[in-house]
């Protein structure tokens, strides 16, 4: 059986981002999936409805949409800025949520999706994840409900080399990936029937 392809997106541009480190941990502790981490978020221009057609979209946006469409599932790690989703992440999701010409489909529609996040605070990324869940209601994405992975005091969960060392977080991460795989399996079975 072919491993499911997960497209992973970090909402942080920081080189030493704990959220990007979480995605690398997902690659290490995966439950049989092939996880590709997107590294070009900085290249996505601000959303512009005038350019949001198949012919006019910037190349970086076209590539992002293609990769999400081809993936079996989506894994998003988000920090929390001002009680919400970072602008760069929301911007990318805006580009992924549209099909104004009604000719190409919606990359996020019914896409199996899992959310997690890390923050140095004691509250983690609870509010940012809640905001993402609201966004994914609009796109009709198939979001994993539990387990919720809020890595609070994230600077204590990684070693000096950036490796996730906290066993509780590792188990939650594996649980999240297992739940995502179940959604992917259900989507594949539905598509076959």
Image (cartoon, rainbow, N blue to C red):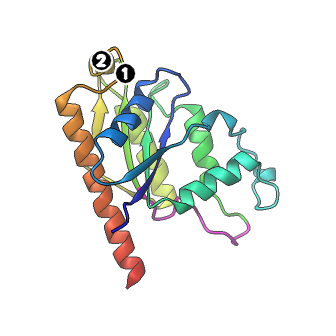
Q: Is residue 29 above or below residue 69?
A: above
Q: Determine the image quadrant of residue 97.
A: bottom right
Q: Residues within 10 Å of mark 2 (few under 14, many from 20)?
A: few
Q: Is residue 57 left or right of residue 66?
A: right
Q: Determine the image quadrant of residue 121.
A: top left
Q: Is residue 110 magenta?
A: yes
Residue 109 percent location from the top left of the image: 51, 63
Q: Is residue 182 left or right of residue 192?
A: left
Q: Is residue 166 above or below residue 109?
A: above
Residue 83 appears in the picture as rendered: yes
Q: Is residue 165 above or below residue 143?
A: above
| Disc 2, SS | loop
Q: Is residue 54 left or right of residue 124?
A: right
Quadrant of the snapshot with the C terminus: bottom left
The residue drawn where x is 77% and y is 53% is 57
Q: Is residue 56 magenta?
A: no
Magenta residues, as a range? 101-112
Magenta segment, prevailing SS (helix, strand or loop): loop
Q: Residues within 10 Å of mark 1 (few under 14, many from 20)?
A: some
The residue drawn where x is 57% and y is 37% is 39
Q: Determine the image quadrant of residue 122.
A: top left
Residue 115 percent location from the top left of the image: 38, 44
Residue extending furthest toward the top? 160
Q: Is residue 47 above or below residue 188?
A: above
Q: Which residue is mark 2?
A: 159
The residue drawn where x is 35% and y is 54% is 33
Q: Which residue is mark 1?
A: 162
Residue 141 percent location from the top left of the image: 45, 59
Residue extending furthest toward the bottom? 193
| Disc 1, SS | loop
Tell me the distance, in whole angstroms, between the alpha carbons under discs 2 and 1: 5 Å
Whether residues under marks 2 and 1 lie with C-beta atoms below 8 angstroms apart, the answer is yes
């Amino acid at each position: 059986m072919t491993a499911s392809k997960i497209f992973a997106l970090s909402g942080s541009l920081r080189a030493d981002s704990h959220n990007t480190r979480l995605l690398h941990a997902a690659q290490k502790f995966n439950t049989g999936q092939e996880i590709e981490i997107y590294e070009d978020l900085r290249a996505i221009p601000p959303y512009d409805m005038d350019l949001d057609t198949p012919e006019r979209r910037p190349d970086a946006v076209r590539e992002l949409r293609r990769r999400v469409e081809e993936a079996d599932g989506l894994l998003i790690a988000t920090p929390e800025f001002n009680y919400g989703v970072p602008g760069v992440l929301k911007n990318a999701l805006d580009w992924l949520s549209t099909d104004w010409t009604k000719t190409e489909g919606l990359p996020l529609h019914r896409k199996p999706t899992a959310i997690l996040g890390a923050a140095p605070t004691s509250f983690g990324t609870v509010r940012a994840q809640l905001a993402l869940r609201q966004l994914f209601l609009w796109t009709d994405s198939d979001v994993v409900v539990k387990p919720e992975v809020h890595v609070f005091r994230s600077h204590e969960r990684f070693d000096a080399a950036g490796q996730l060392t906290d066993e509780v977080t590792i188990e939650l991460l594996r649980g999240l990936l297992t739940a995502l795989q179940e959604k992917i399996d259900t989507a594949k079975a539905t598509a076959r029937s």
